[in-house]
Amino acid sequence: MSLRPGAAPADPAATGRPAAGQLLAAAARPLLLAGAAGIGLAAGWAESGGLALLAVLAVGLAATNGYAKAYSP
Amino acid sequence: MLAAYAMPAVAVWLLLGLCTSALPLARPALILLTAYSAVYGVTEASDRLQLAAPGRRWQVPQELVAGTTARRRLLVWGSVLGPGFLTRNPYAGFAMLPLAVAAAGRGGLALAGAIGAAHGTGRALALLRDARSGPAGDPMRLLLRSAYWRTVDGLVLLIVAGAAVMTCAFRFA
């Protein structure tokens, strides 16, 4: 493949095929989502409809949200 | 520093808790919280759907803090950033918090105070961490950290959604 004079060479990492790690991450993501929802369902069932668990989660989320906002670009 | 951020946050959130606990909002708020957490949990944790987090785009104007004393700057930053309502927030989890306060009914006041303290303290701790380690510098690193926290936020929202579904089932069935 000939390049135009002055053109940058092609990215050597851009082979058009996803790396094994990327495929693994893409496959694991739905499992992670289902796992999180499952944990919530199980914990909610154990709590028998009480609001204490939701309150604890809300306070935890508030703390991480405040902490993580420093990383917002 | 921690108090400058946490105290205004507790005050503002207590005010919100006072308003919501006086109104009959617990049931609709719980249903809304369930739907919101499920939709935004999937959006953030899957990293595929493009649904912006609800909230304001406002940022603190420079003239409010430029050329003022350190004490006044701390007061402005603490009052504006501590409660978390006024400035831009890229994570959808924040908008779930008022719904949680409303869903808590009479316990909403205590929950609101705890949320305010947690958010204000978390915000101040992040600033203290940055002050020790220096500015973030690399924008790509900042972006990757933001994506990481977005995923964490989404996963916690999904846990909340799961727990809220069971709460609805026990309460409304």
Image: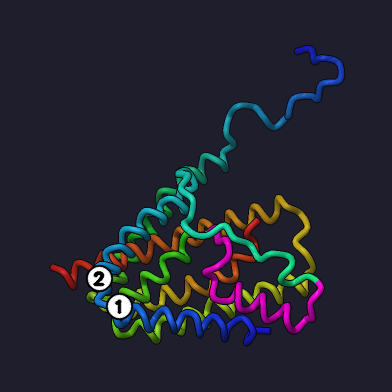
Instruction: Report x, y in % for residue B28.
Output: 25, 67
Q: Is residue B69 magenta?
A: yes
> Which quadrant would the C terminus of chain B be assigned to in this image?
bottom left
User: Splitting the image into 4 quarters, where does residue B6 fall?
Assistant: bottom right
Q: Give the residue type at disc 1.
A: Leu
Of residues A37 and B107, the one nearer the viewer is B107
Image point (60%, 65%), residue name: A69
User: Splitting the image into 4 quarters, where does residue A11 fall?
Assistant: top right
Residue stretch rendered in magenta on the structure: B67-90
Numbered tag placed on residue A51 in the rendering? 1
Dots 2 and 1: beta carbons under 8 Å?
yes
Residue A36, placed above or below residue B8: above
A23 to the left or right of A52: right
Q: Chain of mark 1?
A: A
For the view shown, which residue lies furthest in the left direction?
A: B173
Instruction: Report x, y in % for residue B11.
Output: 50, 85
Image point (41%, 56%), residue name: B41
Q: Separation of disc 2 and disc 1 at Cα?
A: 7 Å
> Which quadrant would the N terminus of chain B be assigned to in this image?
bottom right
Q: Is residue B88 magenta?
A: yes
Residue A39, placed above or below residue A7: below
Image point (56%, 83%), residue name: B8
Instruction: Report x, y in % for residue B157.
Output: 41, 62
Q: Dot 2 corresponds to which residue?
A: B167
Is disc 1 surrounded by few (<14), some (14 to 19) or many (20+) residues within 10 Å? many
